[in-house]
Amino acid sequence: MSSPEIASLSWGSMKVKGCSSSYKDCKVWPGGSRAWDWRETGTDHYPGVQPADLEEVLKKGVDLLVIGRGMSEALQVPSTTLDFVRQSGVDVRVLQTEKAVAEYNKLAGQGAKVGGVFHSTC
């Protein structure tokens, strides 16, 4: 199963190829995607992305995870979260969301087993 391409990104809206709905924030993995609802884990810009935000994507068998911190990089990613990903045997890249989407799409296009979590506003 391949990782779906992110077809478009604008402030507050993301579209994933093959999915009829749009997302504000999203999670993607080989074969699927869904909205990333911060309320599920109590995530906020600070302290930022929690391991619980990433577990679902990591369980999908990804080799690499791309995290988009927002258009202005307001979303924090604590070192403890990065350590959690690496301890799971997965490489991680943290970038501004536009750069993160470009990196994710490049990797997905190369057939990599890549997953991502992306914040599409601040």
Image (cartoon, rainbow, N blue to C red):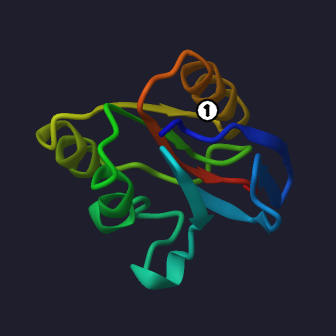
Q: How many badges with numbers are in the image?
A: 1
Q: Is residue 50 visible?
A: no
Amino acid beneath label 1: Ala
Image side of residue 8 versus residue 98, left or right: right
How far across and down, in percent of the image, does residue 17 sit?
76, 46
The image quarter containing residue 93 is top left
Q: Nearer the viewer, residue 114 or 54?
A: 114
Q: Is residue 112 left or right of residue 14?
A: left
Residue at image x 62%, y 59%? 26
- Kindly indicate the quadrant of the structure image that contains residue 99: top right
Can residue 83 be seen here? The reply is yes
How many residues crowd around disc 1 within 10 Å: few (fewer than 14), some, or many (20 or more)?
A: many
What residue appears at the point 18 percent right and 48 percent down from the top-left corner? 84
At horizontal 47% and vertical 40% (from top left) the residue drawn is 1
Q: Looking at the image, is 97 positioned above or below residue 63?
A: below
With respect to residue 106, does 80 lie above or below?
below
Q: Which residue in the structure is indicated by mark 1?
A: 100
Q: Is residue 70 above or below residue 46?
A: above
Nearest the camera: 53 or 63? 63
Asked whether, in this view, residue 84 is left or right of residue 116, the answer is left
Q: Position of residue 109 (x, y in %)?
A: 62, 21
Residue sitting at x 36%, y 58% = 54
> Which quadrant would the C terminus be assigned to in this image?
bottom right
Image location (x, y in percent) of residue 97: 67, 39
Q: Nearer the viewer, residue 10 or 80?
A: 10
What is the secondary structure assignment of the residue under circle 1? helix
The location of residue 38, given as percent across then percent down, is 52, 75
